[in-house]
């Protein structure tokens, strides 16, 4: 069974990959036919499927990182993810559902540091060949105001 | 014995209930004759019992939520709790004492996001019929300046 | 073997000692011939050994706290550490390597609350006589802009 500690360890590795700018490793936290979405709380409440970012395969996540690198946006600032303890809602065999609060801080080149985004990951995990992976991660932001620079993975 | 992982799981569920606006579930994290208080560090250091918020029963917590709903204040903004790892100070039989740092972010309708409150939960836990509950939670805020809008449960 | 839960418990105690202003206990989280450094991401990337703060023994950490107390700077504001889940990178016998994200909030006497520093602890742990201790902690700040008031231990 997938337990709380395994989810904690997974999320620590996930956040570290993004914040240490090893973005190319980010898609490897997902299964091939994954679902990944960034949306906000009101959209989610109203059942609107469209989000700020949408992907339904690992290949799309890889494309997204390639585009980020090309646009060269990401490097201009740094991010720091602080993740809460997951709420493990369901665990059965090789599957689990969990919700994990996140807070992302953005650090500009000027040193200005601000809370960039907060919200909750709504996750479905699966264990494949002994490896824990995301079948689905929906990052539900608390703010309904979209930062057009929201380029980085949440 | 109550262990660190059990406290982590408890706090994750506690924060999720508040941040997902299921406030009516909040009193259920407490025993019937609980103690709940919001205060700040200087008051606590000086042993002043009066706090920003005070309740000494689960019924008072329920009243508080009912009042919040009537005043309709809570819905105008969102909150996000980020809780640290508990410091388990004592665990004996069905009782435990712990301290857990908290950070609460407020998200206004305009999208403005700010650190609203930080501090530490000073907690006494008890397990009743297999269920972990708060006998006492004192939320000691770091700031001595009280926000008069501090309506939400911390 | 040193496991994830042990690191979580260690960090909770470490942060609590600093944030509750029991700074004199801070050096006790380190071995005698420890390495402690505060630096920032660009320095670290370029392999520059010089940091904002540097100590290579527990005695130097104790001196630092004594100086802080004398200068009386620390008391004018409060800090709150929020630490993420450690990424346990290696654990063998009585040794472990880990990376842990941190966020430190500063609370001024006026009540103003701001994100003061974010970054990652790059740690080497050792267990001596059954007690987990830091052989080395390098606090790598995300911001390259040094606050000259960065007086407190990170």
Image: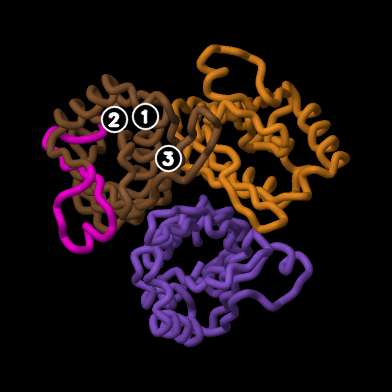
Chain colours: A orange, B brown, C purple
Residue B7: image x %, image y %?
34, 44
Seen in the picture, residue B120 relative to B105 is either above or below; the reply is below
Q: CA distance from mark 3 to mark 2?
A: 14 Å
Residue A57: image x %, image y %?
75, 24
Residue C1: image x %, image y %?
50, 61
First along the sequence among labels 2 and 1: 1
Q: Are marks 3 and 2 on the same chain?
A: yes
Helix, strand or loop at mark 2: helix
Residue identified by numbered label 3: B81
Residue identified by numbered label 1: B17
Residue identified by numbered label 2: B26
Q: Choose top left, top right, bottom left or bottom right for residue A40.
A: top right
* Residue drawn 32% across the image and 49% down it: B3
Q: CA distance from mark 2 to mark 1?
A: 6 Å
> In the image, A20: left or right of C110?
right
Seen in the picture, residue C119 relative to C46 is either above or below; the reply is above
First along the sequence among labels 1 and 3: 1
**Does the CB distance between marks 2 and 1 fall below 8 Å?**
yes
* Residue drawn 52% across the image and 39% down it: B113
């Amino acid at each position: 069974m997938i337990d709380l500690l395994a989810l904690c360890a997974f999320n620590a590795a996930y956040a570290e990959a993004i914040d240490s700018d090893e973005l190319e490793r980010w898609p490897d936290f997902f299964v091939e036919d994954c679902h990944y979405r960034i949306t906000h709380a009101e959209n989610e409440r109203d059942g609107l499927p469209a989000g700020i970012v949408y992907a339904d395969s690992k290949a799309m996540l890889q494309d997204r990182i390639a585009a980020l690198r090309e646009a060269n946006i990401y490097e201009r600032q740094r991010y720091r993810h602080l993740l809460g303890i997951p709420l493990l809602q369901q665990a059965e065999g090789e599957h689990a559902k969990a919700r994990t609060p996140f807070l992302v801080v953005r650090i500009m080149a000027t040193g200005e540091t601000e809370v960039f985004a907060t919200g909750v990951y709504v996750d479905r995990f699966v264990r494949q060949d002994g490896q824990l992976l995301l079948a689905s991660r929906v990052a539900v932001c608390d703010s309904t105001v979209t930062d057009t620079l929201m380029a980085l993975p949440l």
